[in-house]
């Protein structure tokens, strides 16, 4: 049997294992695959029923901080002419330590090739004894992409409106800010405040395509006073602002985040966003999700509507990916 028979393909929070036909009393264990902090295994066994197991690799990380997982798992038949799928009801906040913590016993008549499809909705750990579990993904951008070196006094300048000299007008409110700080973080603002432009004369910048809350999140990022929850809420608006004002680190943070949680509900919007803002990794991830991982069959109607309004260049890329698959 080829080595690829044990490989699990992953993209974002999705894992897929392609299985050849199983005879009765057949057992197979996948190669390890990485999602979050852990390496994982899938096993499949046919013995009257089909038994599917998912568990983390035994390691120091899994022993000290075992994952608390929420996920959706499916079996998808690849036999022509019709793809069939069986879905588990779903697992929410289940701690997985060993290979007996999650077992799915399935009555199925699948023959031929099929796919085990696992989409992780969340992975949590208990950071310290006695503390509540926290998502490994929710706090990532607070630590990695916020301006960790910014002094607390810089954040106070924004939150307490200390000696502000420029007003930012959003679509639903105004915020006082500082020319020097904005110019330091953005070459667009630097150019704006270095010339005799209207914004410099009137001491105002109009950002009418951002809500007050999104604009506040944007300034919080610039001032190093950023919170992970506001990032996840406003990341599309933040991406748009990062592109408009040439703040490359914020754009890259948005790029990484949007790539991390692609799913069937948002993949077409993400693909359009990736094309519009020139995000190659996100575009590749969305195309792989749709084509290589077969999700295009699950959103057939939405995909047809998408093709009616999408950019022709993007449509050509999609069909090139389909033909190459």
Image (cartoon, grey):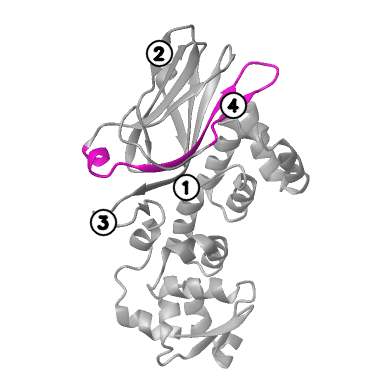
- The mark nearer the N terminus, 4 or 3, is 4
Indicate the secondary structure of the residue bearing disc 3.
Answer: loop
Question: Where is mark 4, residue-wise?
Answer: 86
> Disc 1 designates what residue?
260
Q: CA distance from mark 4 to mark 3?
A: 38 Å
Residue nearest the observer in this picture, 251 or 25: 25
Mark 4 Cα shell of 10 Å, populated few (<14), some (14-19), many (≥20)? some
In the image, 261 versus 49, the foreground residue is 49
Q: Which residue is mark 2?
A: 27
- Rounded to the nearest angstrom, the CA distance separating label 4 from label 1 is 25 Å
Which of pointers 4 and 1 indicates the residue nearer the eye? 4
Q: Residue furthest right?
A: 308
Crowd around label 2: few <14 · some 14–19 · many ≥20 (10 Å)? some
Q: Which residue is mark 3?
A: 130
Residue at x 49%, y 71% (from the top left corner): 218
Q: Earlier in the sequence, mark 2 or mark 1?
A: 2
Magenta residues, start to end: 60-89
Place of residue 206 in the rendered image (x, y in percent of width and height, measured from the top left): 61, 81
Q: CA distance from mark 3 to mark 1?
A: 29 Å
Horizontally, residue 243 falls left or right of residue 147, namely: right
Residue 81: percent from the left, percent from the top?
Answer: 70, 17
Does the rendering let one see residue 201? yes
Q: Earlier in the sequence, mark 3 or mark 1?
A: 3
Give the quarter of the figure containing the C terminus: top right
Q: Earlier in the sequence, mark 4 or mark 1?
A: 4
Image coords of residue 172 (percent x, y): 63, 79
């Amino acid at each position: 049997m080829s080595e690829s028979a044990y490989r699990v393909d992953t993209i974002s929070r999705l894992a897929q294992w392609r299985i050849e036909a199983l005879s009765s009393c057949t057992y197979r264990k996948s190669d390890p695959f990485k999602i979050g902090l852990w390496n994982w295994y899938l096993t499949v066994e046919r013995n009257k029923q089909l038994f599917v197991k998912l568990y983390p690799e035994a390691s120091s990380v899994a022993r000290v901080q075992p994952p608390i997982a929420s996920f959706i798992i499916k079996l998808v038949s690849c036999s022509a002419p019709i793809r069939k799928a069986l879905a588990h009801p779903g697992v929410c906040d289940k701690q997985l330590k060993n290979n007996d913590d999650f077992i799915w016993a399935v009555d199925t008549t699948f023959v031929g090739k099929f796919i085990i499809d696992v989409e992780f909705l969340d992975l949590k750990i208990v950071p310290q004894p006695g503390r509540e579990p926290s998502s490994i993904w929710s706090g990532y951008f607070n630590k990695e992409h916020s301006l960790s070196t910014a002094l607390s006094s810089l954040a106070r300048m924004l939150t307490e409106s200390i000696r502000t000299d420029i007003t930012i007008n959003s679509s639903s409110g105004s915020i006082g800010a500082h020319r020097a700080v904005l110019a330091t973080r953005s070459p667009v603002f630097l150019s704006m405040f270095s010339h005799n432009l209207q914004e410099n004369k009137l001491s105002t910048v109009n950002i009418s395509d951002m809500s007050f809350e999104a604009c506040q999140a944007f300034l919080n990022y610039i001032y190093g006073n950023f919170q992970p929850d506001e990032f996840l809420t406003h990341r599309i608006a933040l991406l748009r602002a990062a592109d408009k004002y040439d703040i490359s680190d914020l754009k890259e943070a948005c790029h990484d985040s949007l790539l991390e949680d692609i799913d069937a509900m948002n993949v077409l919007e993400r693909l359009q966003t990736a094309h519009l803002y020139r995000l190659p990794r996100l575009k590749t991830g969305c195309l792989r999700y749709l084509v290589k991982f077969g999700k295009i069959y699950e959103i057939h109607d939405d995909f047809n509507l998408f093709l009616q309004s999408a950019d022709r260049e993007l449509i050509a890329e999609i069909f090139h990916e389909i033909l190459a698959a």
